[in-house]
Image (cartoon, rainbow, N blue to C red):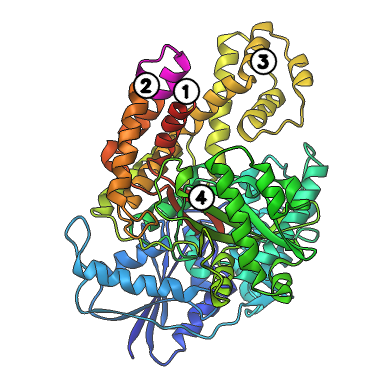
């Protein structure tokens, strides 16, 4: 390998010493002839692309490194676009040997090959004489005073006028150079300690805690150790915020160290609700586009394997004080049920009773084969639970499975109060493997299996679908003049504020800004730090007060909240439907029969609900039929509840048509 051109794409707002350090490491590699830093167009607070190019010109003294502006906001896209018109030769993507950078490199190589063979929607192909190579360099993270170098820290310093902190982001350069860089920016004179931000300023919060997702090439995905460290930080921070709800808050990195990874969420019972991407307000619009792009190109597995979300009964199992225990809620997490108590809990419920009773007995028998020392090592005497699904054919919900299995999802650790500390996603597979190694995976009723890892292919005409979904995201973003890097929360806050102010104007109410903001917080993120009585007492206009009381009614509020979230839901249900059509190796043994069963039951449900005189049934029918129609009708129904994937360290689900089908069949089941 020689004469390699290294592409180093990124946001670089601003370029830091760490960026230049990596670029120089590549430039000094004997196989490299040139390093091209591709800088995207988007500005960050206080930093433009022009600023970063000026910094590069001041700091770079290596003739093998150059910088080129690119019109593409996504770094990886800019690398592909460069290759469409590049001269023949060998090209590599900049990545260190740390963390999971190699995953992105391998994805880059395979995607270049796809563009060479298939081309894009306009018929363009990357030239056949382009050679995509893997070239990693040994780079230890650049630090200053023991702290990692980051563009976020540089932006904080610029915003606060803190030269000392800014200089720490360029440790390898003489002070004269750094002062010249500092002069590029219009920095305030106020000291850093004078800057205050409120907890409600989520845009600031995101910028402090997380590097721009577009700067993916400069960082890495979370390792297990990073996720553990993150969970401890978030636990400490959450405790502080809970005790100081509603108060002004300044994020102090001395008390709450920086972390860039979110908290993984789990599904069902004790684990809570697993989010769709549209449920998370702390994603940016760029994040949403990245999830869409990964999904359509079959690359949702770059952080963790994509697994099947099964349609069964959720249960958590542990080992505490010398016996196997079970839990379905937080109280039982503290005092887990024995197999006998689990059976008694579900007694008298037909097939459901059988499922939980037999599952308890089989798990008890299987885990006992591991030995007490191994069980305590895994479960830490009841601190760790295995999150799993009971698949029992007689308890079919929507999807028909033909075999009885107990499927592990992951391992979850809790503190003494029952609060989640961390989630070990591969832990479910490791525990199942331990049981199988002990020859205990085939029990009396159930087979014990690991999470079902799915293979996702590239969606046909993915670029057309990507363009369409990106446009939907952009329509939502531009409605309130937001940037690609803004949190989706900013959309929701603006939406609720617009609704409240419009109603106030209609009713002739002069509502103070603090009351508007309190209502926005209450209805958008369930922040009820200002109680309802105090809130309504502060409103003088009786008509507006009555509207607030009516809107705060749970049933009415739920309708309006759905109206708010629906455009985002539509985008990701469409994405899910497209992706699920490509999955082949799901758990349902006879997929064609399973789909036919679902369609038959759905037809019966629709006919029953159409003949109902209950207005609630008719509203529900109209709502969910519209959702199914928007997703492509009956043809998009598959025998698969959804997929589970990891993005930015968080666990998400995509469900396609399952959600509206499940709602209609549920209404049918409980109305007969």
- Asked if marks 2 and 1 touch (Cβ < 8 Å), the reply is yes
Residue at 47 percent of width and 51 percent of height: 310
Q: Earlier in the sequence, mark 2 or mark 1?
A: 2
Local secondary structure at mark 1: loop
Q: CA distance from mark 4 to mark 2?
A: 46 Å
Question: Would you say residue 473 sits in the magenta stretch?
Answer: no
- Asked if marks 2 and 3 touch (Cβ < 8 Å), the reply is no
Q: Which residue is mark 1?
A: 671
Q: What number is the disc on residue 485? A: 4
Quadrant the C terminus occupies: top left
Q: Which residue is mark 2?
A: 608
Q: Nearer the viewer, residue 94 or 617?
A: 617
The residue stretch that appears in magenta:
608-622
- Residue 518 found in image quarter: top right
Residue at 47 percent of width and 88 percent of height: 28
Q: Which residue is mark 3?
A: 549
Q: Earlier in the sequence, mark 4 or mark 2?
A: 4
**Residue 573 x/y as whole percent:** 40, 42
Q: CA distance from mark 3 to mark 4?
A: 35 Å
């Amino acid at each position: 390998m020689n004469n390699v051109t290294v592409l180093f794409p990124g946001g670089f707002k601003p370029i830091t010493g760490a960026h230049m350090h990596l670029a120089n490491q590549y430039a000094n590699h004997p196989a490299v002839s040139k390093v091209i830093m591709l800088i995207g167009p988007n500005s960050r607070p206080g930093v433009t692309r022009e600023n970063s190019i000026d910094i590069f010109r001041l700091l770079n003294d290596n003739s093998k490194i150059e910088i080129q502006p690119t019109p593409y906001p996504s770094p990886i896209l800019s690398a592909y676009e460069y290759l469409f018109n590049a001269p023949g030769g060998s090209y590599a993507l900049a990545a260190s040997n740390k963390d999971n950078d190699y995953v992105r490199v391998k994805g880059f190589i395979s995607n270049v090959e796809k563009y060479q063979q298939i081309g894009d929607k306009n018929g363009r192909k990357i030239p056949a004489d382009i050679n995509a190579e893997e070239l990693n360099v040994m780079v230890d993270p650049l630090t200053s005073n023991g702290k990692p170098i980051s563009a976020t820290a540089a932006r904080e310093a610029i915003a606060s006028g803190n030269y000392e902190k800014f200089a720490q982001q360029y440790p390898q350069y003489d002070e004269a150079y750094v002062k010249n860089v500092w002069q590029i920016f219009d920095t305030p004179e106020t000291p850093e300690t004078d800057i205050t931000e409120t907890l409600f300023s989520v845009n600031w919060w995101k910028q402090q805690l997380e590097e721009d997702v577009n700067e993916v090439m400069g960082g890495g995905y979370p390792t297990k150790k990073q996720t553990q460290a993150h969970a401890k930080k978030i636990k400490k921070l959450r405790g502080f915020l809970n005790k100081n709800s509603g108060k002004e808050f300044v994020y102090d990195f001395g008390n709450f160290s920086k972390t860039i990874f979110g908290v993984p969420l789990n599904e069902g019972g004790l684990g809570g609700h697993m989010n769709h991407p549209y449920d998370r307000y702390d994603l940016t619009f760029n994040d949403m586009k990245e999830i869409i792009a990964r999904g359509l190109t079959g690359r949702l597995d770059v952080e963790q394997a994509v697994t099947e979300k099964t349609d069964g009964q959720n249960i958590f199992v542990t080992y505490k004080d010398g016996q196997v225990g079970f839990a379905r809620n937080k109280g039982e997490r503290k005092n887990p049920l024995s197999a006998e108590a689990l059976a008694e809990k579900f007694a008298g419920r037909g097939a459901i009773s059988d499922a939980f009773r037999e599952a308890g007995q089989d798990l008890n028998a299987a885990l006992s084969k591991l030995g007490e020392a191994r069980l305590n090592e895994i479960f830490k005497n009841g601190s760790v639970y295995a999150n799993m699904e009971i698949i029992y054919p007689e308890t079919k919900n929507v999807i028909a499975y033909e075999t009885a299995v107990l499927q592990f999802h992951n391992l979850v650790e809790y503190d003494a109060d029952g609060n989640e500390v961390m989630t070990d996603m591969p832990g479910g597979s490791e525990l199942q493997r331990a049981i199988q190694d002990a020859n205990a995976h085939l029990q009396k009723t159930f087979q014990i299996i690991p999470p079902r890892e799915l293979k996702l292919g590239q969606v046909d005409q993915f670029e057309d679908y990507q363009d369409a979904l990106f446009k939907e995201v952009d329509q939502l973003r531009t409605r309130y003049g937001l940037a690609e890097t803004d949190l989706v929360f900013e959309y929701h806050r603006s939406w609720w504020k617009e609704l409240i102010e419009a109603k106030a104007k209609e009713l002739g109410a002069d509502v103070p800004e603090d009351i508007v903001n309190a209502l926005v917080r209450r209805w958008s993120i369930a922040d009820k730090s200002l109680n309802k009585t105090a809130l309504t007492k502060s409103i003088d206009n009786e008509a507006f007060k009555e509207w607030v009381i009516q809107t705060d009614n749970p049933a009415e509020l739920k309708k309006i909240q759905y109206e708010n979230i629906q455009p985002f839901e539509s985008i990701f249900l469409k994405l899910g439907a497209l992706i699920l059509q490509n999955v082949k190796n799901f758990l349902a043994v006879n997929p064609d029969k399973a789909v036919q069963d679902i369609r038959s039951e759905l037809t019966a449900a629709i006919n029953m609900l159409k003949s109902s005189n209950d207005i609630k049934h008719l509203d529900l029918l109209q709502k969910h039929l519209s959702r199914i129609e928007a997703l492509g009708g009956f043809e998009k129904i598959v025998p698969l509840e959804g997929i589970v994937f990891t993005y930015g360290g968080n666990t998400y689900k995509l469900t396609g048509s399952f959600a509206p089908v499940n709602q209609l069949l549920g209404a049918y089941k409980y109305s007969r």
